[in-house]
Image (cartoon, rainbow, N blue to C red):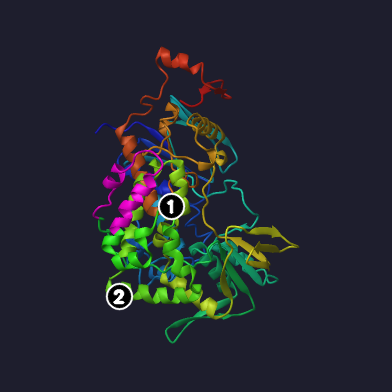
Amino acid sequence: MAKPTERIAIIGAGATGTYCLNALIAKRAAAEVTVFESSACPGPGLAYSPDLNDIHALSNIAGFEIPPLLETLNEWAVRQPRQLLQQWGIADRAGDDRSFFPRAVLGAWLADQFARLAASEATSVVVHTGAEVLDVIAMPGACRVEWRGSDGVTAVDQFDRVIVASGYGAIGTEGNDAERSTGKSASIAANNGASKRFGVLGSSLSGIDAVVAIAMARGRFEQEAGLLRYIPDQPWEAVLMSRSGLLPEADFWFPHPLPELEGFTPETASACLTGEDGDLDRLFAQFAAVLMRDAPQWSARIGLEEATADDFAERYFAKRQSSDAWAHARKNLEDVRSWSENKDTPAWRIVILKAHEIFATVITLLTPHDLSRLHRGLKRVFTDNYAAVPHLSIERMLALHDAGVVDVVALGSDYDIRPERSAWRVQSPAWSARLDELIDARGPQAAALTLFPFPTLRLQLCASALEESQDWRDGINPAPDLTASEQDPALRNVHLCALPFLLRNRPFVQGLVECAAMAQAVSEAISATSPFENGAYSTAEQLIDLLDKPSVILPTGEVLPLAG
């Protein structure tokens, strides 16, 4: 193998950036990697930062599912001092790879792994913490990064490639003025003694964590006769608000790796695509056939034989929608505990869990019309199934409901939120309330391309989207190597792993498994190509063609053509 010569920049040292650094070092794909991280601690990012997550906030991915870095999460955990494990509440299960650890613990693991990777002898790694990247410029001959260091000094550096691994920072997304929430902001709100009534937008694990943060600040959980009880120290109440009013279901046992689905594989899914509207229906037909074969009773119960890709979600949620949310949560928790004990989860759950992986392999090839249909229907089913939450999270919610301090309501799609005399008014056709505190725990939202943080690269991406008649609101839809090189040759050495901007076209891109998969795809692409291969405008025909392209003049005087 030839000695690597490339200088590569990674923007963002959260989970995606950490996995990218690991993959580049493992493949010896770079001579030097420079990492720009806005916080003081590379590794955790916002999602797993101990500064933003109280220790009670649980992850919803178990150790056996998390792709290892230099070691697995559980291997790392068992090496930690027992006193620290006790502080984290995992002293008796550090080695259990089916356990769910607090998010802050995953953050500590990521920070440790990043630090060890940064000390690699195989690749030179330069880390800038407290660094704000101001701009990225992709050119046929180089990628330029302008950044401001923690000392306030602005600098410019040039790289062969740039990996944009920025995650869920402030990107100026539109929306109401509710406080952007983490467990920490919820607990801070709870410490306002004048606040008695809390509203939490979102009923997923993020919403649950926000409510639990308030509960911890205003009372305590206790075990009594094998049941978890909540004892408030002062009066308060909270309401979880979502469009459906459903609580997430509890995590269930499944075999790992998941079994292949006979008749529905990446190959069969790809083979049925035509590139035209209706591909979603062809994919759904394969998926439904497997469900009817492997889970016939459940399929008959929801009327799957008559179902379509558009109404499958309504059939899937119908029973829960007509049931009391708390009664369903109690019964579901009882069921999944039995499934886990017997390692016998119903087949329909396993099929749906595997099928979402199959759909993920072809989603980027769907037409805009079919993609919109998937977001409205099937995506909700897949997300509900794979985003099941730890048992303890459901136990806590049941205890809080039994104590009379928490409820959940359905807002539907027609609701209004507005400030009202130092409080908030939430109004929907079926429900209205005045809330002292409003916390937005809906999780990451898909971001429009116009909100991309680096102005010159944003201009380049917008020009490429315009040339391809793509809607800027859809974010980015890069190639498998995470570049947009098909639209603009100058972009072939910018790998776009900025999660909020991928969510519209890759709705299942969230999570550590996907972070690792993107890192692997990028590192393999880098290993397989030379820097700026086919990227320079070198022939007379190409140079003449530039005259017909819109261009910008950089402060350095260089002319930068836009789009391909």
Task: Kindly report the secondary structure that dominates the magenta region of the rendered protein.
Answer: helix
Is residue 513 visible from the viewing direction of this image?
yes
Residue 534's spot in the image, x, y percent?
37, 24
Left or right: 205 with respect to 22? Answer: right
Q: Earlier in the sequence, mark 1 or mark 2?
A: 2
Q: Nearer the viewer, residue 327 or 537?
A: 327
Query: x%, y% of residue 512?
Result: 39, 54
Q: Is residue 247 above or below residue 465?
A: below
Label 2: few (<14), some (14–19) or many (≥20) C-alpha neighbours in 10 Å: few
Residue at 43% over, 52% down:
510
Q: Which residues are magenta?
A: 262-290
Residue that appears at 58% across and 58% down: 413
In this picture, residue 11 sits left or right of residue 260: right
Q: Position of residue 500 (x, y in %)?
A: 50, 47
Residue 82 position by quadrant: bottom left
Q: Nearer the viewer, residue 84 or 522?
A: 522
Q: Secondary structure at mark 2?
A: helix
Mark number for residue 510?
1
Asked if residue 272 is among those painted magenta in the image, a careful observer would answer: yes
User: Is residue 414 a member of the stretch shown in magenta?
Assistant: no
Q: Are discs 1 and 2 less than 8 Å apart at CB?
A: no
Q: Given the image, on which type of amino acid does mark 2 rest?
A: Glu
Q: Which residue is rendered at x = 49% and y = 31% of the image?
A: 464
Residue 509 versus residue 156 in the image, above or below: below
Residue placed under numbered mark 2 in the picture: 341
Q: Position of residue 323 (x, y in %)?
A: 48, 73
